Image (cartoon, helix red, strand yellow):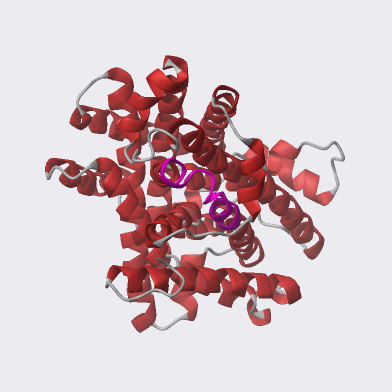
């Protein structure tokens, strides 16, 4: 059994309770037994990259880009559900299937792209957590980065007691982030009419807004989350018959809708808060530090502190999840892993280099999200391909509207990426000023 599979195992007691519930031996409902994989993955949708892009979106364009958050969240729900289904039905993760089903000439480039995406992810997450610690405690950013690294490594060591403590720790941090933004909604002066309108009204004002929109998509639909979810479900519970498999899929889909729905609402709250606080008088806010310092006189020290607490919880938890995903990607594509402490150190190095070179940390977060958006089609297309194969998925292969929705979601991502590439090379983009 691989290291990644070991890490996703539950305690004997929890596994037995889940098996009893699936078999019908125990009728008493305990929905928390099945909560875990989607909650862990959902933190990838509330990481510091989201803070950076959502602050820019709200400050510069008010509520206008809320529809992008809604669209990205719906696409995320669909693809995370497909990833979870792939793991439950096949018992393997997406990276393993790529290695087994595709030729080496294809899987090696896929692995390289996925590793680059994982490093870009960790850059955003690690820097975000360090920025939160630095601003909250008034210590230098370098020292905050070291502290962030130690905290994330300590949380990663929880898996030695079984995977359930890790799920609980990540779930608690998700709860902290959600409560922080619920509190912000009571503090910020929100225009709920504009919020409702722009949540469903597509509008890209100009080319700069397009760059932020692609960054929002890159920060919302995450490549490493698509790989990780299949690994968490594939190695968590083994259904013993078709009936148990159907029941497990039903529980999984419910968890995805709830966990990713909460993540989507948190992302919307980020844009709403930035719009309410910054758009009219501080539309140029594009830096997390500047956002914090501006919040103090605008909404009070309490609102600013809540913002930092949510950023800190986001950075630490998402960095943990990113490291887990990196291990799974390597194990799946090339069949081996490295010690967790070594991966933690290696993924910290780019962040130290960025800060050492004097690059603005928030700007680095934005760039990392664009990199993620460009890498996203690799796991998306592979996931669509595998989940629609009857030879692999049997009766659970994608059908009808699911297949159309998955292909449409992948097409939207590809089109956005092509537009971004054209914009990057200075090519004219129709309908954009």
Give coordinates of residue 423: x percent, y percent.
33, 69
Horizontal arrangement in the rendering, residue 327 relative to residue 225 (left or right): left
Q: Main secondary structure of the magenta part?
A: helix
Give coordinates of residue 184: x percent, y percent.
54, 26
Task: State whether residue 343 appears in this view.
Answer: no
- Image quadrant assignment for residue 117: bottom left
* Tally of numbered tags: 0
Horizontal arrangement in the rendering, residue 197 relative to residue 19 (left or right): left
Name the quadrant of the C terminus. Answer: bottom left
Task: State whether residue 167 appears in this view.
Answer: yes
Q: Is residue 432 above or below residue 278?
A: below
Horizontal arrangement in the rendering, residue 236 relative to residue 317 (left or right): right
Q: Is residue 407 above or below residue 320?
A: below
Residue 22 magenta-drawn? Answer: no
- Image quadrant assignment for residue 389: bottom right
Give coordinates of residue 201: x percent, y percent.
62, 56
Q: Determine the residue positioned at 46% across, 71% down.
A: 431
Query: Seen from this angle, which residue lies furthest top?
Result: 301
Q: Could you say which is closer to the camera, residue 266 or residue 145?
A: 266
Q: Determine the residue positioned at 58% across, 59% down.
A: 202
Q: Could you say which is closer to the camera, residue 157 or residue 373?
A: 373
Q: Determine the residue positioned at 53% across, 43% down.
A: 267
Span colored in magenta: 57-72
Horizontal arrangement in the rendering, residue 219 relative to residue 139 (left or right): right
Give coordinates of residue 382: x percent, y percent.
51, 73
Q: Could you say which is closer to the camera, residue 131 or residue 387?
A: 131
- Image quadrant assignment for residue 411: bottom right
């Amino acid at each position: 059994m691989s290291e990644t599979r070991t890490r996703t195992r539950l305690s004997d007691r929890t596994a037995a309770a889940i098996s009893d519930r699936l078999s019908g031996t125990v009728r008493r409902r305990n929905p928390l037994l099945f909560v875990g994989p989607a909650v862990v993955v959902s933190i990838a949708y509330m990481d510091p990259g989201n803070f950076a892009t959502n602050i820019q979106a709200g400050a510069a364009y008010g509520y206008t880009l809320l529809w992008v958050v809604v669209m990205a969240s719906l696409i995320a729900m669909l693809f995370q559900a497909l990833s979870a289904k792939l793991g439950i039905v096949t018992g393997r993760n997406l990276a393993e299937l790529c290695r087994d089903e595709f030729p080496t000439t294809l899987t090696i480039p896929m692995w390289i792209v996925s590793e680059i995406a994982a490093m870009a992810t960790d850059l955003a997450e690690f820097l975000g957590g360090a920025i939160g610690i630095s601003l909250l405690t008034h210590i230098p950013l370098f020292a905050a980065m070291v502290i962030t690294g130690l905290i994330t490594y300590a949380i990663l060591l929880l898996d030695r007691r079984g995977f359930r403590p890790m799920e609980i720790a990540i779930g608690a941090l998700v709860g902290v982030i959600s409560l922080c933004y619920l509190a912000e909604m009571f503090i910020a002066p929100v225009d709920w009419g504009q919020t409702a309108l722009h949540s469903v009204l597509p509008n890209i004002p100009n080319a700069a807004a397009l760059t932020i929109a692609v960054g929002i998509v890159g920060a919302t639909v995450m490549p490493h989350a698509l790989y990780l979810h299949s690994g968490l479900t594939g190695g968590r519970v083994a259904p013993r018959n078709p009936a148990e498999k159907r029941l497990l899929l039903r529980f999984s889909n419910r968890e995805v809708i709830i966990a990713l729905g909460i993540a989507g609402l948190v992302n919307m709250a980020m844009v709403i808060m930035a719009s309410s606080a910054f758009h009219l008088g501080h539309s140029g806010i594009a830096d997390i530090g500047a956002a914090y310092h501006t919040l103090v006189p605008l909404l009070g020290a309490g609102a600013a502190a809540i913002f930092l607490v949510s950023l800190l919880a986001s950075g630490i938890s998402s960095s943990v999840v990113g490291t887990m995903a990196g291990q799974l990607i390597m194990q799946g594509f090339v069949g081996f892993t490295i010690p967790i402490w070594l991966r933690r150190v290696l993924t910290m190095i780019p962040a130290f280099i960025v800060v050492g070179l004097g690059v603005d940390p928030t700007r680095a977060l934005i760039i990392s999200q664009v990199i993620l958006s460009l890498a996203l089609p690799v796991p998306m297309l592979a996931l669509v391909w595998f989940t629609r194969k009857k030879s692999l998925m049997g009766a659970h292969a994608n059908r009808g509207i699911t297949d159309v929705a998955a292909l449409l979601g992948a097409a939207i991502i590809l089109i956005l990426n092509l537009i971004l590439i054209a914009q990057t090379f200075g090519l004219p983009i129709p309908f954009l000023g």
